[in-house]
Image: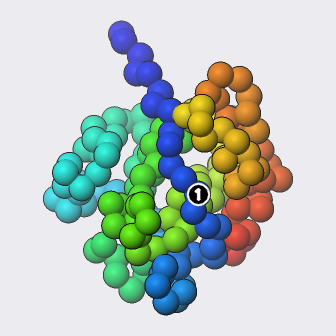
Amino acid sequence: MKTAKNIPLDFEVDKLTNSIENTSTGEVFDTAVVRITSKDLRIIHKSDWQFDWAKEIHDKSKEVYKLTTINNPTIIQGLLSIEDKQDHIFMHLIESSKFNKEKDKIYLGVPGNLVAFACKISIDKGYQGFLAFDAKTALIKHYQETLHATHFRGLRMFIETGAALRLISQYFKL
């Protein structure tokens, strides 16, 4: 059986907020991160996303989550695909919605919120917050500085307990 190659991640952590923050007003919105349902596939249009999220959702080894605001759960702010490796969580994909990318983005904090959630799942499962992912070479330093991630070797990076707890406390109440 052919094994899938991990895609190096290229998300940019724009700002570590305590939720998501409107770029023009500074207003902060409470968020929820929930597992995607098949019903959500109707509102995830391939043309709006860089990655094939339907493929991720149908992969039984992965769990896909959506980030929404509490007040508007029908608008997806970002998506996250993770896998339980039995001693850590592996982050396969993470993506902000197209309106939360580039210089005209509506909200700050989407990637940080999703990474913190992945770390929280790792804590909840007893993995001490360990989260691994592959990063594009040009972003390794960025993830070291913003997420306090550790470069392991090649493209592989990981977030250990201290950094995970810092991120989780930024976004979630333990």
* Quadrant of the image containing the N terminus: top left
**Vertical arrangement, residue 1 with respect to residue 29, above or below:** above
| Above-or-below relation of 147 to 173 | above
Residue matched to label 1 = 13
Quarter residue 62 falls in? top left
Colour scheme in the image? rainbow
Mark 1 secondary-structure assignment: loop
Amino acid, disc 1: Val
Q: Residues within 10 Å of mark 1 (few under 14, many from 20)?
A: some
Indicate left or right for 155 with 9 as reference: right
Report the side of 16 relative to 74 (left or right): right
Residue 128 can be seen in this image? no
What residue is rendered at 40% in x and 21% in y?
A: 4
| Vertical side of 24 occupied by 73: above or below | above
| 147 to the left or right of 5 | right
Instruction: List x then y, in percent, for residue 100.
Output: 40, 66
Looking at the image, which residue sits at the far front?
103
Q: Residue furthest left?
A: 42
Residue at position x 50%, y 39% from top?
A: 9
Q: Position of residue 33 (x, y in %)?
A: 47, 66
In this view, which residue lies farthest toward the right? Answer: 162
Q: Is 65 rendered above or below residue 30?
A: above
Does any portion of residue 54 appear in the rendered image? yes
The number of discs equals 1
Q: Position of residue 25 (x, y in %)?
A: 49, 89
48, 67: nearer the viewer? 48
Coordinates of residue 125 in the picture (x, y in percent): 65, 49
Identify the residue at image location x=55%, y=68%: 109
Viewed as shown, does residue 95 lie left or right of 54?
right
Identified at 42% across, 61% down, the residue is 102
Q: Which quadrant is home to the C terminus? A: bottom right
Between 107 and 113, the residue placed more toward the observer is 107
